[in-house]
Image (cartoon, grey):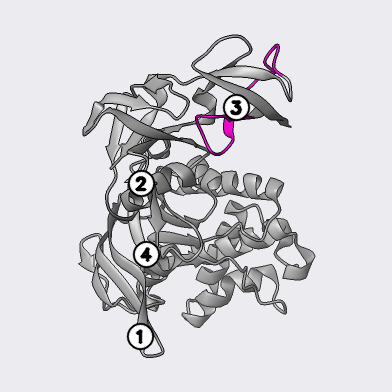
Amino acid sequence: MAHAALSVRNLAKEFAVGAGKVVAVDGVSFDVRGGEFFTMLGPSGCGKTTTLRVIAGLEQATRGEITIDGRDFMAVPPQLRNIGMVFQSYALFPHLTIFENVAYGLRLRKLPAGEIDRRVASTLALLQLEPYAARHPSGLSGGQQQRVSIARALVYEPTMLLLDEPLANLDAKLRVMMREEIRALQRRLGITTLYVTHDQEEATAVSDRLAVFDRGRLIQLGTPEEIYARPQTLFVADFIGRANFLPARLVVRGSPSSGVALPNGASLRPERVVRLDGAEAAALPATDDGTVMIRPEHVALDPKEGDIACRVQRMQLLGGLIRYSVRADASPADILVEVTRPLPGIAEGSGAFLRIPAADAVLYHR
């Protein structure tokens, strides 16, 4: 399959609502390399699906540019873009067999019967659907039906594959299995893939790079490792994985490099500092200069010594992970600590101490 490269520049999409308008996509720009698995991630209503539909030609952009392999696609009708699209709903024809569901679009394009048979057979084999060719969709599981919807998109031999929340209708265990199948298939084919999801674990598990959206805007773009380890905003820090946020005051006013004091009096000098702008800076309490973010797996919990006195509220066994929720004067919310083994001397209701490594802490300040 071809490895199409995509470029999106200053993309905007507005919808008329009564006498006003809603801005669904607001000046989004990004590039997708040929053969890349690129995910658009964000909460419901953030603009990711609208962006995908504009790329597919199912929505018309208010303004902006879309090019594929250097060719302007803004005026190209969807049926001529040679893009495969997989939707959240499988949208299979219940009265047609699996073979005919996959062949349907090719028949509309009036391809020769021999070519249709060849393409459908090849695609069903690729997705391990050959035994089900004569069945109807009602005779398949949810995961198998989703494979059929992917087969129907791939049978066109598209230059790009777009998937919009493709696993949303599957149970948790099947979602994990299907996302690995989709990733393995994409690697085998080398097809440029755009994937939309609100599930951050799903996004970080399968993506080469991902774009985090919020309220119609692209907030941060990078590899899963970059975005998890170095979130550029409080929204991204909170949305990707779990995070603890501790109110902080600068030790020296106007000097983030001087370090911060936490509400319990402990001091800390985070090695990474991010300046907040706009709404996030304005949302900080007037009494605080910023907030310190630390991931639960980086917080140390000790029964005898540390920087912050606390009391253990809850201990949860989550498969191979143990999560402690502790209460401390340094934070208005419970602080989460995650480890792979139970900590000796730590139990629900017991007193303990927290230690926050400066190398793993991030200071977000005004």
Extreme top residue here?
304
Span shown in magenta: 326-346
Q: Residues within 10 Å of mark 2 (few under 14, many from 20)?
A: few
Q: Earlier in the sequence, mark 2 or mark 4?
A: 4
In this orientation, does residue 319 appear? no
Q: Earlier in the sequence, mark 3 or mark 4?
A: 4
Q: Secondary structure at mark 3?
A: strand
Q: Does residue 21 lie above or below 145 as drawn?
A: below
Instruction: Kindly report the distance in space between the C-alpha atoms of the residues bearing marks 2 and 1.
Output: 34 Å
Question: Which image quadrant: the C terminus?
Answer: top left
Q: Secondary structure at mark 4?
A: loop
Q: Earlier in the sequence, mark 1 or mark 4?
A: 1
Question: Where is mark 4, residue-wise?
Answer: 216
Which amino acid lies under the numbered mark 1 shown in the image of this protein? Gly
Question: Where is mark 2, residue-wise?
Answer: 286
Question: Where is mark 1, residue-wise?
Answer: 20
What residue lies at 38% left-to-right and 66% top-to-bottom? 51
Q: Secondary structure at mark 2?
A: loop
Q: Earlier in the sequence, mark 2 or mark 1?
A: 1
What residue lies at 41% left-to-right and 76% top-to-bottom? 58
Question: Mark 3 or mark 2: which is in front?
Answer: 2
Instruction: Kindly report the distance in space between the C-alpha atoms of the residues bearing marks 3 and 2.
Output: 31 Å
Instruction: State the image coordinates of residue 256 (x, y, percent, origin top left).
Output: 25, 30
Image-based side of 167 in relation to 225, left or right? right
Q: Label 2 near label 3: C-beta < 8 Å?
A: no
Residue 257 painted magenta:
no
Which amino acid lies under the numbered mark 4 shown in the image of this protein? Gly
Numbered tag placed on residue 338 in the rendering: 3
The picture quadrant where one finds residue 11 is bottom left
Which amino acid lies under the numbered mark 3 shown in the image of this protein? Glu
Q: Main secondary structure of the magenta part?
A: loop
